[in-house]
Amino acid sequence: MIISHPSTKDNLNNGLGNLMQYEEITNGIEGKTEASKFKILVYSPHIFRIHITRNELYDDHSYAVVVQPDFEDYILEDAGDYLTIRTSDITLKVDKQPVKFTFYNKRGEIINEDDVFGTSWIGEQVTTYKKLQDGERFIGLGEKTGPLDRKGHGYQHWNTDHFAYGVESDPLYCSTPFYIGVHHKMAYGIFFDNTHKSHFNFAASNNRFSSFSADSGDMNYYFIHHDSVDHIIQSYSHLTGKMPLPPLWSIGYQQCRYSYYPDKEAVTVAQTFRDKDIPADVIVFDIHYMEDYKIFTWDKKKFSNPKEMIDHLRSLGFHVVVMCDPGIKIEEGYEAYEDGKHQDIFLKYPDGEYYSGQVWPGWCHFPDFTNPKTRRWWEEKFKDYVDLGIHGFWNDMNEIATWGQMLPDLIEFDMEGEKATSRKARNVYGMQMAKSTYEGARNLLKGKRPFNLTRSGFSGVQRYAAVWTGDNVATDEHMLLGVRLVNSLGLAGVAFTGFDTGGFVGNASEHLFARWVELGAFSPFFRGHSMINSRDSEPWAFGEEVEEICRNYIKLRYRLMPYLYSAFYEAAQTGTPVARSLAIDYTHDQKIYDPAYHNQYMFGKNILVAPVESTKHLTKVYLPEGEWYDFFTDRTYKGGETIIAECPIERLPLFIKASSIIPVAPSVGDNTCDLGDVLELHVYKGKEEGQFTYYEDDGESYNYQQGSYLKRTIKYDPGKSSIIVSEAEGKYKSKYNKIRVCLHGFDFDSVRVNETMVEIKEITYRFIEPISNFDPIYTEPNEALQVKDLRFVEFENRAEAFKVTLY
């Protein structure tokens, strides 16, 4: 039912009009205007929800938001011409004639305000217009191409299978309609919770406003304000959920190809990793493992005994991940098809006929993952996979992708009993498939954590799956674009993300592949993948030089596993991403938005990565405020300046922030189960205090939820020249028997651990080895890749607190 409103005969754009009445409700207010009704709900001192509809009922169902408002410590005042709702952090002013919204910080400064058009409709399309602030920038929005600063650009959210997408293509596979605005040393976030096709205009083709709109449905958005971008992301993650702690093996190196077959080829690839001393944890099977591309089957000729193959791969220390596509082939006698019909779980046209679309197996029906009954059916189908020993799953083609790429709008979805068409359901289909796979695998694995990967998703997808950036292209441009996509997904609360290392489409050159592996080692999700009819793309397929470089950087990834797993723990606790755009920590530094530097990012909180093309041997790097160490040599640099960094193909520019603490496993074997028994704590001298939360558990079970974990706070105090490690929290016993504290940049003559003087040892330290038998740019390659005379102390790893003091 549409609420009556004044004649629109002469007005093509229909706004809210004036406030007619309002009343206070639990956690906020509800009001009625000449054209609509609205609710304002307060979720926390930092989060307001604005919900506007022209219909009789609000559409309150959300696949994205997992919390309800539970905050009442606000003040409502009626000043005559306007209302105010005030928390300790935000004041919302609601103008009455016409209704529009302005948000102020606690100093009374405007954070964000409606343009005079406010929220209005053109037909079914609903739009909110926001007045541009001086110097305002826009970041985030998830999987979107283009620059870090999105001002002057427009984007759509409409999940699309976009093979070999261009560096400016839009839309892509995943929709996360959340962005962050930055101006006047302030920042705010807006999450638009509407699953219809949506549009974001950040002052593209106008200099008056930014706007966000949906083709239909309610205007339902959340406004978030904090003093930092990091806390804005954390509040957004409070709304939409945080990623679960992944299995440790899933953040090791994964090797994939479209496709490895027959089974002997997959086993040979796995054995070659072991023979060549290149760590890896996963072999991934693309669609050719199936019989005629039919999900839940195995090709009887190419994979005659999958259990035997998987057991053999496990004996080599590999987990297996298999492709899962949603299309169920229409074929009599095919169990999944027959049972799907019997259970009536497929998508339908309005007349009740099942929708059919053509994809890899041929003509297919598609499960309706917005129906709880379908999700239970899907879980049951995964039992055979789990019984074979498979713990990882890859959800693909779930936009829904079909040949022709024109899913009819009139297809009906259950939407948890509130039926809707493709217009509303398309953007959440992939997320609901990922949910079905994740929850099914989690239940079937009975205490083991599954790995789950998806191509398509919506806000909140981080609760169920990692996300990779789809069918990229083997070019330097695409390599750097992949970095920006991963960083932007992190800004939208998706912490476990990555790209197809080496490029999926086309053939990488030798040096491009080497550089891509270097960058992949500093991506949250690290997988090599290439398509059919392209050259082999394993680390050894490009010659000895590239093989050595790949071995170096994959091993470096594994050496950094204690640091990386702790970063994943932080992401699971707070929503702070693993790969952090510099806009998170250096939001108001104008230089980081320069296209020359906007690919740079922090890996975890302490390592700065400066991506660079494969063709360059020198590059400009901008180091933000503070002091920085060259990762390989310990040369120091003053922050706030641009440097020229050497970057021959064997060296990716990496820098460590002063006062950082980096946990490292120096001894790397075959996989994440083989990291030795020594934990190094690399501490970098600085002027500020440093702190790191170190986290460890068994890496595969949920026992950490019952206290079987180890967590320690490590603090560096420059004033007292000391490193303080807290008592171990939790019941888990560390896998590392010894601790080695490595001291970078310090001047000292003696070291005391608690009250005991200890021996100081000294070595020449390398995080990676120099490349042999080649002619690198450096005259002295060893010097370019080593820390000279690094001093350290070593002692038994006990659960008690300890203090290292330098004299």
Image: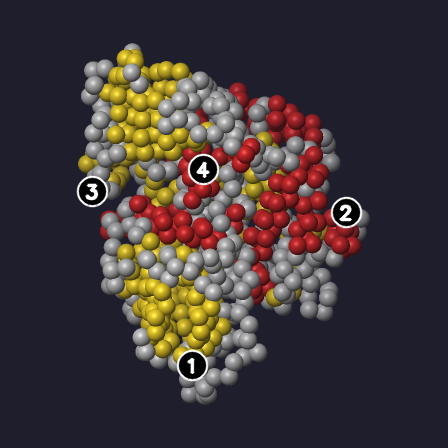
Residue 615 visible in the snapshot: no
Q: Which numbered mark, 1 or 3, is in the foreground of this view?
A: 1
Q: Earlier in the sequence, mark 4 or mark 2?
A: 2
Question: How was this image coloured?
Answer: secondary structure
Kindly report the distance in space between the C-alpha atoms of the residues bearing marks 4 and 3. Answer: 30 Å
State the SS at label 2.
helix
* Residue located beneath label 2 in the image: 335
Kindly report the distance in space between the C-alpha atoms of the residues bearing marks 3 and 2. Answer: 63 Å
Q: Earlier in the sequence, mark 4 or mark 3?
A: 4
**Amino acid type assigned to the residue bearing label 1 in the image:** Met
**Amino acid type assigned to the residue bearing label 2 in the image:** Glu
**Amino acid type assigned to the residue bearing label 4 in the image:** Tyr
* Residue located beneath label 3 in the image: 640
Seen in the picture, residue 23 relative to 502 is either above or below; the reply is below
Contact (Cβ within 8 Å) of mark 3 with mark 2: no
* Residue located beneath label 1 in the image: 20
* Residue located beneath label 4 in the image: 569
Q: Residues within 10 Å of mark 3 (few under 14, many from 20)?
A: some
Q: Earlier in the sequence, mark 3 or mark 2?
A: 2
Kindly report the distance in space between the C-alpha atoms of the residues bearing marks 2 and 1. Answer: 59 Å
Find residue 135 and report its horizontal and vertical position in percent: 25, 60
Q: Quadrant of residue 114?
A: bottom left
Find residue 126 and report its horizontal and vertical position in percent: 46, 72
Seen in the image, is 664 located left or right of residue 344? left
Q: Which numbered mark, 3 or 2, is in the foreground of this view?
A: 3
Q: Residues within 10 Å of mark 1 (few under 14, many from 20)?
A: some
Q: Quadrant of residue 98?
A: bottom left
Kindly report the distance in space between the C-alpha atoms of the residues bearing marks 1 and 3. Answer: 53 Å
Kindly report the distance in space between the C-alpha atoms of the residues bearing marks 4 and 2. Answer: 40 Å
Q: Residue at x 64, y 36 (%)?
A: 445
Residue 351 visible in the snapshot: yes
Q: Residue at x 70, y 34 (%)?
A: 387
